[in-house]
Image (cartoon, helix red, strand yellow):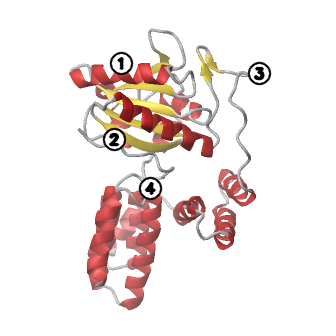
């Protein structure tokens, strides 16, 4: 059994982009409602879209796993008890290899969530009802922070006066400015807004994480996967090329590969190169999530190299 991971924030270390453009053909469950439904690689686009309204809990299960059957039933009961503030997407792992890969599932069953289009790891294996309930409560809080605090009825997202949760307070102006800039692909403007927010409040953790994410997106903008990997392969000692491919690895969910690449290169560099790698790693740690076990291990390794 894997201990549940509290949903502490939205991180970009899992790449769902390949699933966004697929036909939106999410299939409802036998119950015929939108609170619990089946999904797969081809239909996950609609679940991503729905996650902008309410948090979407995703369970990767398999018919051959007795734990899976038990967990799906438990999740359905606990999700329905929240009366549409969460939805459950049930994905057969055998029919959804891209979802398994995208969510980096190491065991079946695995439970993750998507909030406002971004993945949130939860837990693997069967968990007690009270533990799942606590995770769901935290997920609802995370949804509220990111504007995904609506309610879904049997026919889909409810509309009309009195049918939805009260609107959440607007984002702080600088956060809204950054989000608007991200929507139009202006990562320079988004980074500027986040830097101003941090200058005003150095404890603004969401702005720190947001700045790390938009810096990553900005560095990759306009570059192709092939040119980045070819440059790194042909110049193993070119620091810029290795930094680029580490960015690419992290953005595609290859978190450990990104960290290992830079940490392996670190001892060979001069003082300026080591400073650049250390700064990039600290930023990538924010993108992946500072409490992620892979980040903890990489940070420990970096500390050992520094001292």
Q: Which residue does the numbered mark 3 point to in the structure image?
A: 160
Q: Earlier in the sequence, mark 1 or mark 4?
A: 1
In front of the other: 246 or 213: 213
Label 3 element class: loop
Q: Nearer the viewer, residue 57 or 2?
A: 2
- Residue 141 lies, in percent from the top left, at 56, 41
* Mark 4 vs mark 3: in front: 3
Q: Are marks 3 and 2 in contact (CB under 8 Å)?
A: no
Q: Kindly identify the residue that appears in the image at 31 percent across and 57 percent down.
A: 293
Give the residue displayed 67% in from the left and 50% down from the top. 183
Q: Earlier in the sequence, mark 4 or mark 2?
A: 2
Query: Quadrant where the C terminus lies?
Result: bottom left
* Residue located beneath label 2 in the image: 101
Q: Which residue is mark 1?
A: 73
Answer with mark 4 or mark 3, whichever residue precedes in sequence.
3
Instruction: Please report contact status of discs 4 and 3: CB closer than 8 Å, yes or no.
Output: no
Q: Position of residue 45 (x, y in %)?
A: 52, 32
**Residue ranking furthest to the right:** 161
Query: Does residue 116 appear in this view?
Result: no
Label 4 residue SS = helix
Disc 4: which residue: 251
Q: Is residue 105 left or right of residue 145?
A: left
Query: For the residues marked 4 and 3, what is the alpha-carbon distance in whole angstroms?
Result: 38 Å
| Quarter of image, res 294 | bottom left
Q: Is residue 126 above or below residue 66?
A: below
Which comes sooner in the sequence, label 1 or label 2?
1
| Quarter of the figure that contains the N terminus | top left
Mark 1 → mark 2, Cα distance in angstroms? 24 Å
């Amino acid at each position: 059994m894997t201990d549940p991971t509290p949903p502490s924030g939205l991180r970009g270390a899992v790449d769902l982009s390949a699933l966004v453009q697929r036909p939106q053909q999410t299939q409802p469950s036998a119950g015929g409602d939108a609170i619990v439904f089946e999904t797969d690689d081809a239909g996950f686009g609609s679940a991503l879209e729905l996650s902008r309204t309410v948090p979407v809990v995703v369970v990767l299960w398999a018919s051959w796993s007795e734990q899976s059957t038990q967990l799906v039933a438990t999740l359905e009961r606990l999700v329905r008890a929240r009366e549409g503030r969460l939805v459950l997407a049930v994905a057969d792992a055998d029919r959804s290899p891209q979802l398994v890969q995208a969510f980096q599932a190491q065991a079946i069953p695995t439970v993750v969530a998507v909030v406002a289009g971004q993945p949130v790891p939860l837990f693997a294996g069967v968990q007690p009802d009270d533990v799942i309930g606590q995770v769901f409560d935290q997920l609802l809080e995370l949804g509220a922070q990111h504007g995904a605090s609506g309610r879904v009825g049997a026919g889909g997202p409810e509309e009309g006066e009195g049918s939805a949760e009260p609107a959440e307070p607007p984002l702080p102006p600088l956060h809204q400015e950054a989000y608007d800039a991200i929507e139009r692909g202006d990562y320079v403007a988004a980074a500027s807004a986040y830097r101003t927010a941090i200058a005003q409040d150095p404890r603004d953790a969401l702005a720190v994480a947001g700045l790390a994410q938009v810096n990553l997106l900005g560095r990759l903008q306009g570059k192709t996967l092939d040119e980045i990997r070819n440059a790194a392969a042909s110049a193993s000692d070119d620091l810029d090329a290795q930094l680029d491919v580490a960015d690419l690895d992290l953005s595609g969910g290859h978190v450990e590969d990104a960290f290992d690449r830079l940490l392996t290169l670190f001892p060979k560099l001069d003082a300026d190169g080591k400073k650049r790698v250390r700064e990039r790693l600290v930023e990538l740690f924010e993108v992946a999530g500072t409490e992620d076990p892979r980040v903890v291990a990489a940070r420990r390794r970096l500390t050992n190299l520094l001292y």
